[in-house]
Amino acid sequence: MDLPIMEKEKVHVENISFTYENHLLEAGVLRLDKIHEEISGNKFFKLLRHFDLIQAGCVRKIASFGGAYSNHIAALAAACNALGLESVGIIRGDASAPMSHTLKQAKRYGMVLEFVSRQEYQNKAQLTSAFELKGYYVIPEGGFGLLGASGVQMMYDWIDDSYTDLVCAVGTGTTMAGLVKGAKPHQRVWGVSVLKGYESLTTEMESMLTLDELGRTYTIAHDYHFGGYAKYSKTMLDFMNQVYTQCQLPTDFVYTAKMLFATWDMHRKGLFDEQAKILLVHTGGLQGNKSLAEHALLF
Ligand SMILES: *Cc1c(COP(=O)(O)O)cnc(C)c1O
């Protein structure tokens, strides 16, 4: 099904060309950051197949998991709001702590937030069954899983076969798995992990692939996390500002800036074929930049 809140007509591919430290990178950028004013990127795609099932099963109550900064929770709240469904966010943390921008947004979309301790949150299987018994359709944390990856394949509606290399930022690996699933034989998928030392990532990502899909060409880069999730350096902010100045392309410090920096660096190191035609998947996340100091970025 279509989620009416996805402003698909705003999504497009644009070409960028920028030079950083005397090395030129030219690539196409799939602007999924344009999909919605407040909630940008890949999160709605990961929900598409779940909403097929929700609709087919006539379920009215949806629940999922997330931390205080979960873009997945915000996207789910917005989608449920648009479809007139009840939603519950099971949030790791303390109800009395000041609420993050993301959670406030989810609440504005009518999501009921239920805070659970870190310990309770660990036991997601138990929380899932408890909600299922109450008649909820429960979506895994971060939209992780095969259904999520299957929705991501819809991104190929915008991706020309002439691209040889597709690059995305990786959290749970669901978006990357979806790109691998939809890739043509001549296309290679690159994932840039934003987490430090997430050693089981390859296994988790591959758990969403069929035997046939496991034979495709894909690579996960683990060395561009800049210290870990949501960590950044002055170099990275400088890089983001340079990209913006040269191409008017905004990036976020948690995901897409790391993806773009990694692509530039791997290109500089000659890891792409000389004839490669690269497509960068801009998965959005720009609202995350609000947590940076006010003048850190030029955009
Ligand atoms: C969630 C997110 C990702 C990671 O997606 P996964 O499917 O979990 O790997 C990448 N980029 C942005 C902007 C995100 O919000």
Image (spheres, helix red, strand yellow):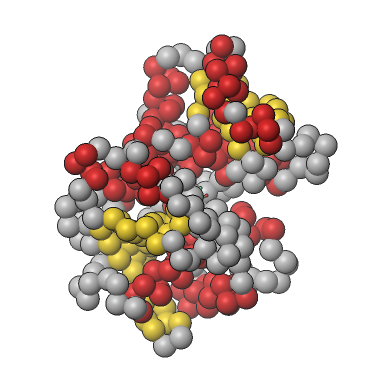
Q: In which quarter of the image is residue 298?
A: bottom right
Q: Report the front residue among 249 and 142.
A: 142
Q: Residue furthest right?
A: 96
Residue 21 in the image: state x and y as whole percent.
46, 86
- For the point 19% across and 41% down, which residue is it? 212
- For the point 46% across and 70% down, which residue is it? 261
Task: Give the answer, above or below, for where 269 lies relative to 56.
Answer: below
Q: Residue furthest bottom?
A: 22
Which quadrant would the N terminus be assigned to in this image? top left
Residue 211 can be seen in this image: yes
Q: In which quarter of the image is residue 63?
A: top right
Q: Report the front residue among 88 and 12.
A: 88
Residue 100 in the image: state x and y as whole percent.
72, 45
Task: Give the answer, above or below, for where 86 lies relative to 101.
Answer: above
Task: Give the answer, above or below, for where 71 lies relative to 281.
Answer: above
Which quadrant would the C terminus be assigned to in this image? bottom right
- For the point 29% across and 77% down, which residue is it? 270
- For the point 70% across and 47% down, which residue is it? 101
Residue 44 in the image: state x and y as whole percent.
47, 39
Residue 109 can be seen in this image: no
Relative to residue 115, is residue 166 drawn left or right?
A: left
Residue 8 in the image: state x and y as whole percent.
41, 45
Q: Report the front residue among 99 and 215.
A: 215
Q: How many marks?
A: 0
Relative to residue 61, is residue 177 drawn left or right?
A: left
Relative to residue 68, is residue 241 drawn left or right?
A: left
